[in-house]
Image: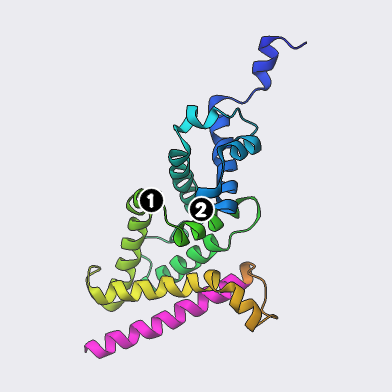
Amino acid sequence: MRSKSEIEAVAPSHDETRQLLLEAAGEVFAEAGFRNATVREICRRAGANIAAVNYHFGDKEQLYSEVLRYSHGKMLEKYPALLGLPAEAPPEKKLHAFVLSLLLRIFDTGPTSWHGRLMAREMIEPTAALDSLVEERIRPMSIQLGQIVGEILNRPPTDEGVRMCAFSVVSQCTFYKHCSPVMERLFPKQPDMDPVAIGHIADHVTKFSLAALKSFVEKKR
């Protein structure tokens, strides 16, 4: 029989258990959605006691809110909004980096692929947790894109035309995710969303958007 010290040596620490819960919860929420996900299944996957969620997060709602923050933060760590471009980079290059980063987050694969699926679910079935996520994480990125588009159009970021153009840029990116079931049926031979394909799409979305933005500038003259 193992001693108490031996058991403590192999047992997850407080921070490790919390991390395991976040990862397990992210997978379960991405698969089942917030409403259908169960604390029991989350704890089973995390290898944690059923009371661990209440201990670390308070309840299922708080856990979900924290998972959204954690997920978005991890994706931005992996794919920063401007992919490391310097502040003095031309706005056209910033736009391409922003688009590419967004597409990479949307179509991320491997162990972290649940991040994109979780955000897709939250957009379709929004919860109360979306409010804080928007204010803490998404709004700053929206402002950043508005500044890029505003610089290209030579208009203030708060201009309604800038806002609509920024929405159009993001919409082109999310189309490839939300409409993929239809696209796969219309064009069954299209390539998988690997880094090369994502790069081609980012190039196209950027060129298409810049052409449209150029027409806005010319009309204003």
Picture disc at residue 133: 1
Measuring from the top left, give residue 177's x and y in whole percent.
54, 69
Measuring from the top left, give residue 17's x and y in whole percent.
57, 30
Q: Residues within 10 Å of mark 1 (few under 14, many from 20)?
A: some
For the residues marked 2 and 1, what is the alpha-carbon distance in whole angstroms? 14 Å
Image coloring type: rainbow
Q: Type of residue at label 1? A: Leu
- Residue 216 lies within the magenta run: yes
Q: Type of residue at label 2? A: Met
Q: Which quarter of the rendered picture does the C terminus lie within?
A: bottom left
38 in relation to 160, above or below:
above
Q: Quadrant of residue 126?
A: bottom left
Seen in the image, is 100 located left or right of residue 91?
right
Q: Main secondary structure of the magenta part?
A: helix
User: What residue would you read off at disc 2?
Assistant: 75
Q: Which residues are magenta?
A: 197-221
Label 2: which secondary element: helix
Q: In percent of the image, x 59 and y 77: which residue is there?
A: 182
Q: In percent of the image, x 39 and y 81: which residue is there?
A: 210
Label 1: which secondary element: helix
